[in-house]
Amino acid sequence: MTQFSFSLSATDGTARTGVISTPRGEIRTPAFMPVGTAATVKAMMPESVRATGADILLGNTYHLMLRPTAERIARLGGLHKFMNWERPILTDSGGFQVMSLASLRKLTEEGVTFSSHIDGSKHHLTPERSMEIQKLLGSDIVMAFDECPALPATDAEVAKSMRLSMRWAQRSRDAFGDRPGHALFGIMQGGVTRELREESAAALTQIGFDGYAVGGLAVGEGQEAMFSVLDYAPGFLPKDKPRYLMGVGKPDDIVGAVERGIDMMDCVLPSRSGRTGQAWTRRGQINIKNARHQDDPRPLDEACTCPACRNYSRAYLHHVFRSQEMISGMLLTWHNLHYYQELMQGLRDAIAAGTLSAFVADFHAKRAEGDIDPL
Ligand SMILES: [Zn+2]
């Protein structure tokens, strides 16, 4: 059986490209993972997600443990079978959503107690329970259970929270055990403080994980602060393991993160934007509900090969969005995911060719041109 492994094939500056191998298939890096929160990437069939070029999806432990529950998914054959996605799945640990969505949150050394945002029912999540849930789901890449401090937080609060997360990282490692073909990733915390990031990375490396995530970013600190952490934090992590930046991001966040040595990312943005009439293109962001599109026979992006751009005009996309037709979210989500995956392929190719700086310059130049020329 194929084991979980990571091999780098080229670097360009601090950027890297390679392949993660799993029993469920290969993941080309840098990789963008669409988010399938409730066992579906909203508005997309799984085969359509695959057609955009996605090698792996993300599933949310918090959402799935509440509804339909991990035990029910396990009885039905696991998450891959349940949602008809046979390729790799990464599941988060639940920690972030407990912080951002749940109420009546009570934190102890043991774990966290909270009330469901769906029905107010009471739940308990610990490193051991998070490992159990992710095993029931059948996740290929399991995330260690961590605590995400609510912002704004003082340095002392961030340090205390990070050290708790490192103790939980050890408990996650112990509870995960030995599962050939499955990977466990540790999560670096420490906010925007270099010393805390370094301490967190040292603690995780000491425990030993199959990959390492940079957590606690993209939580409202802004791109400049995020990039300043990414200027040094990936360098604290082992070179031969995948590095995953959680919850990122906009296309220019992704490009900047890849330049700084990140291998994997996830974000709800392309799918969520698709449902609110926002399209991401090489030439920036388009709001399809804008009246300027209502007579425009051209596609969203003339260079895009996705079904929304091949077969439909801006005028049509504008009409179905205004009419609240379901196909609006379907087509715009498809386009956005296609654009994101095409961007990742462009980044991988440029790193392999040693031409990343030219690729990045062209990326920024195209966006600066703005949306397509007037008719
Ligand atoms: Zn398109």
Image (cartoon, grey):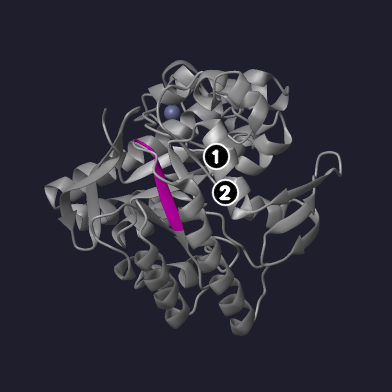
Left/right placement of residue 239 relative to residue 38 reads: left
Rendered location of residue 371, percent (x, y)? 46, 43
Q: Is residue 78 above or below residue 292?
A: above
Secondary structure state at the residue bearing disc 2: loop
User: What residue did someone put label 2 on?
Assistant: 93
Going 47% across and 47% down the picture, which residue do you hit?
Answer: 176
Q: Residue at x 13, y 52 (%)?
A: 354
Residue 375 seen in the figure: no
Q: Residue furthest top?
A: 311
Magenta span of residues: 181-186
> Is 261 in front, or is 271?
261
Per the model, the C-alpha gap separating discs 2 and 1 is 8 Å
Q: Is residue 317 magenta?
A: no
Residue 86, image x and y in percent? 43, 22
- How would you rate the neighbour count of disc 1 (Cα within 10 Å): few for under 14, some for 14-19, many for 20 or more? many
Residue 342 spot, x, y in % from top left: 34, 36
Instruction: Tell me if mark 2 has few (under 14), some (14-19) or many (20+) residues whose alpha carbon lies within 10 angstroms of its own.
Output: many
If the image is split into quadrants, where does the N terminus sit? top left
Q: Earlier in the sequence, mark 2 or mark 1?
A: 2
Q: In the picture provided, is 275 more to the left or to the right than 230? A: right
Above or below, 15 against 319 in this view is: below
Label 1 C-beta lies within 8 Å of the nearest ligand 1 atom? no
Q: Amino acid at mark 2?
A: Ser
Asked if one can make out residue 182 in the rendered structure from this viewpoint, the answer is yes
Q: Which mark is residue 134?
A: 1
- The image position of residue 147, as x and y in percent, is 61, 62
Helix, strand or loop for disc 1: helix
